[in-house]
Image (cartoon, rainbow, N blue to C red):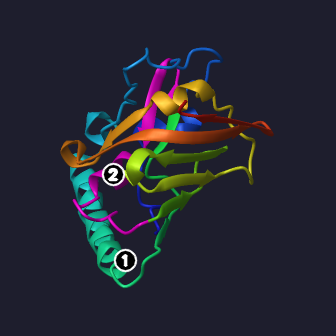
Amino acid sequence: MDDSLITPLNKGVDHFNYTEGACPGPAPEGEVLVPETQSRYEDEDQDDAEVTRQIGLYSGYMKTLEDWSQSHDTNFYASHRPLFAVACDGDHMNVLDWTMQQSLGPHTLDRVSAAIAGHMHWFEALSFENQGLPAQIVVGNAGTDLIKNYVNQETLPTIELRVGVDDAYTARVEAGITARRGQASTAAKS
């Protein structure tokens, strides 16, 4: 999907404050860490009418995705921006991409196996418990300097995403892998 119309909140992931050790660690036993969603309506540099127009446009595209996915057992969503990637901005963990998440209908992803994207300048793959969300694969390792991704690997299995309109989609990360500066680490729920 061509999502190039989106003007990212606060200039986007390329402008996040990556500080080693600042990203939250794992949630305490029995608890979950819920990354923040970043509404573009909260950004004074965004035009609210344009944000609303873009959500409407992409909602139509997502409805088409939902309709097309009924014809096949295995479906992939491919776009520039990830639907469910996690990244740290200082000591805040965020889930990307808010505009696309707001465009999801209640059954858009029912028959989507994986979401494949770039945008972030590192590799990240997340799978979710009970397939509550499609697997998210971010392959952003080329074309520019890699951004240091300091999501603590042991934190991944304690993350629960709550995304979409009124948190319509909720799922806990089952396993994840992140590559930063040529090094890969994995983490899985124990």
Residue 33, x across and y down, in percent: 40, 25
Question: Residue at left 51%, top 63%?
Answer: 79
Indicate left or right for 88 with 49 as reference: right
The magenta region covers 88-112
**Label 1 sits on residue:** 69
Among the two numbered marks 2 and 1 on one chain, the one whose residue lies closer to the N terminus: 1
Which of the two discs, 2 and 1, sits closer to the camera?
A: 1
For the residue labelled by badge 2, is the local secondary structure a helix, a strand or a loop?
helix
Does 30 appear in magenta?
no
Dot label at residue 25: none
Classify mark 1: helix, strand or loop: helix
Q: Is residue 94 inside the magenta stretch?
A: yes
Question: Does the image show residue 103?
Answer: yes
Label 1 neighbour load within 10 Å: few <14, some 14-19, many 20+: some
Q: Is residue 134 left or right of residue 120?
A: left
Q: Residue at x 47, y 61 (%)?
A: 4
Task: Please tell me how many numbered marks the rendered image carries.
Answer: 2
The amino acid type, in three-letter code, at marker 1 is Ser
The C terminus - image quarter: top right
Residue 43 is situated, as x and y percent measured from the top left of the image, at 32, 35
Identity of the residue drawn at 50% across and 38% down? 86
Distance in Å between CA atoms under marks 2 and 1: 18 Å
